[in-house]
Image (cartoon, grey):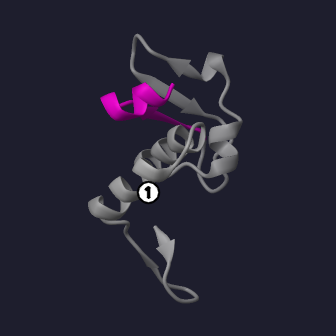
Amino acid sequence: MFAKEEGQTRAVSVDEETAYLLTASQPLRDIATVNLHTGMRPEEVFRIEVRNVDLLRKTVFNPWEKRNPPSTWCLSTKKRSAF
């Protein structure tokens, strides 16, 4: 979600996501993929450690979530490729 005006947000369209990811260089492309598909903040993505990713179970654990208790995200094929 991107800010529209103060206090408002909007969803990123599939076309916007595709255009952004096609022009983004690595590692920004992988970071943005995880951001867009999990809702994790950039800081949370940067803090992910190998021990937080379980490729067999296809999950990533986020112990740094600010507003909620720690969460575990399922990794889609698109997200898994970022790891």
Instruction: Name the spot of residue 6 as percent of width and height, x first.
Output: 58, 88
- Where 38 falls versus 76 (above or below)? below
Is residue 14 in view from this perspective? yes
Instruction: Name the spot of residue 36 as percent of width and height, x first.
Output: 44, 51
The image quadrant of residue 63 is: top right
The image quadrant of residue 59 is: top left
* Magenta range: 70-83
Task: Give the residue furthest to the left.
Answer: 14
Q: Is residue 81 magenta?
A: yes
Does 41 sit left or right of 36 as displayed?
right
Q: Residue at x 46, y 67 (%)?
A: 1
Is residue 74 in view from this perspective? no
- Where 28 falls versus 62 (above or below)? below
Instruction: Name the spot of residue 64 as percent of width and height, x first.
Output: 68, 41
Q: Which residue is mark 1?
A: 20
Task: Give the residue furthest to the bottom.
Answer: 5
- Where 9 falls versus 11 (above or below)? below
Q: Is residue 21 magenta?
A: no
Q: Nearer the viewer, residue 40 or 33?
A: 33
Q: Residue at x 51, y 25 (%)?
A: 83
Secondary structure at numbered mark 1 = helix
Badge 1 density bin: few <14, some 14–19, many ≥20, Cα 10 Å = few
Task: State the count of labels.
Answer: 1
Give, as a three-letter code, the residue at label 1: Tyr
- Where 10 falls versus 38 (above or below)? below
Instruction: Name the spot of residue 49 as percent of width and height, x first.
Output: 67, 24
Does 23 sit left or right of 70 as displayed?
left
Q: Residue at x 35, y 64 (%)?
A: 16
